[in-house]
Amino acid sequence: MDINEKALLHRAQAGDRGAAGTLFESYYQEIYTYIFYRVSDTFTAETLTAVVFIRMLGRLPTFFDQGKPILSWLYTIARQLVIDYYRTHERSDQLSLKEHLLGSDQGQSEGPVQSRDSLDCFQGAMRHLNEQQKHVIILRLIEGRSIQDIAELINKSDHTVRSLQSRALHSLEKVVEMEEVI
Amino acid sequence: MNRYKFDLILEDCLSRIDRGESLQDVLDSYPALNGRLEPLVRAALMGRRVPKPVPSKDGFRMGKIMLLAEMNNMQRVNYNKQKRSRLASSGLTERWLGGVVKLFQVKRTTSLKPVYRFAVVGLVLIMLAGFLTVNASASSLPGDPLYDLKLGVEQTRLFLTFDQEAKQDLALRFEEERVSEVEILLEAGRQEEVEFAGVIEQKFESIWVIKGVSVQIAPITELKGDLEIGSVVDVAATT
């Protein structure tokens, strides 16, 4: 955690609304992206993202700085929240992202044909990934983070992250192969 | 080749592509692994083409409002807890009790006849019971036995306040108290019927934020008049 992050957290702990708002603005996109690929629709993703930050507020008084990035802490909260969400709704973690991504502005700007193909394959592959593989793929491919960054964010070694990435890409590749056969 | 080394090589390929090298150049560096590497690297490139989801502006704005509303709620709840704790530990009740005990001790040292002594004690006890009941009702919540007494005391105080400005201040304080009660009930997970008034601060699908409190609008909710953001409304709901 850098000095700015520490200062923001301390201010938010002291009840500073501005600091809480800045934390929200700084990490909203990352948390939204993660949750979006774990749940089935934009509304749920937006609501759960907001709840992550509300849970963050609730845990601020007992937060103990272990030197890790705030985002790592937020991902932990988000992961638990998604688990709670599926437990409550008794649904499986099977995604139907295509329509939602294609419905978003950015999805359309990428070009419908290319986006649809990519999304088809990506969606299919994601169904075969476990939770950690999914998280690594989101951070590595969609957010473009380095292995070292990811290792720090998800509290794993570089070696473990490379291994998760490799296994996830194998699943992704299998789906591509199946699509070509079909 | 063991898995560890293969994972390192795969990551090297992806990093080099990130730095701008072509797929062919990268694969040419590992001719013996070409067949294994190529489909994985292509799969990664496909994943990179997937657009990053963009949250809606409304979702972002609403999320931030919810966060700040929650912060307000937490601060209010903490304030109420501190207030209750102060009342419980060093409040009026103990001071009055101390005063009554002192009075009783003083009376015992005088030469009052037993009948008058009992009359004084009886009077003091009646006054004390009344005071304690009113005092206890001040921290009661909707659904509590003393809650109606609390509302009655508030109405009496309003009735007996003749200065218009002071009356308005008092009415505002009582409205704030209604919202605090709702927050305490929500925090305690108690289900009670509540009433409060406030401005509609935000409307987000079936969730409206009214005076910092999130209110679920159900299909059976009776909505009277044009209820837009900024409208002042009376809310009758269940926590």
Image (tube, rainbow, N blue to C red):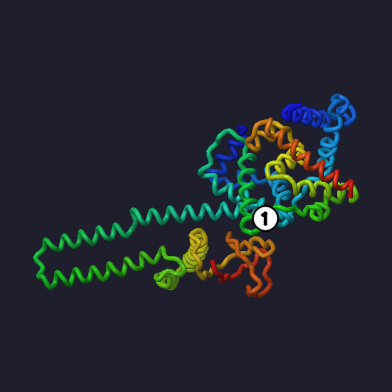
Q: Chain of mark 1?
A: A
Q: Which residue shows up at 88% across the image and 31% down it?
A: B23
**Image spot of residue A41 (x, y percent):** 74, 56
User: Residue A72 occupies which quadrant of the picture?
Assistant: top right
Residue B179 horizontal side relative to residue B18, left or right: left
Note whether A2 is above or below B156 in the view shown. Answer: above
**Image spot of residue B95 (x, y percent):** 29, 57
Residue A83 horizontal side relative to residue B127, left or right: right
Sort mark 1 into few (<14), some (14-19) or many (20+) by Cα contacts within 10 Å.
Answer: some
Residue nearer the viewer, B2 or B232: B2
Mark yes or no: residue B172 visible. no
Note whether A52 is above or below B136 in the view shown. Answer: above
**Image spot of residue A52 (x, y percent):** 62, 49
Residue nearer the viewer, B7 or B138: B7
Q: Which residue shows up at 36% across the image and 64% down it?
A: B135
Q: Which residue shows up at 60% across the image and 61% down it?
A: B214
Q: Which residue is mark 1?
A: A47
Count of all numbered marks drawn on residues in the image: 1
* Amino acid tagged 1: Thr
Mark yes or no: residue B195 visible. yes
**Image spot of residue A27 (x, y percent):** 68, 43
Residue B233 horizontal side relative to residue B17, left or right: left
In which quadrant is the N terminus of chain A drawn? top right
Q: Identify the residue at the far front of this view.
A: B1
Note whether A66 is above or below A100 in the view shown. Answer: above
SS for callout 1: helix
User: Residue B230 occupies which quadrant of the picture?
Assistant: bottom right
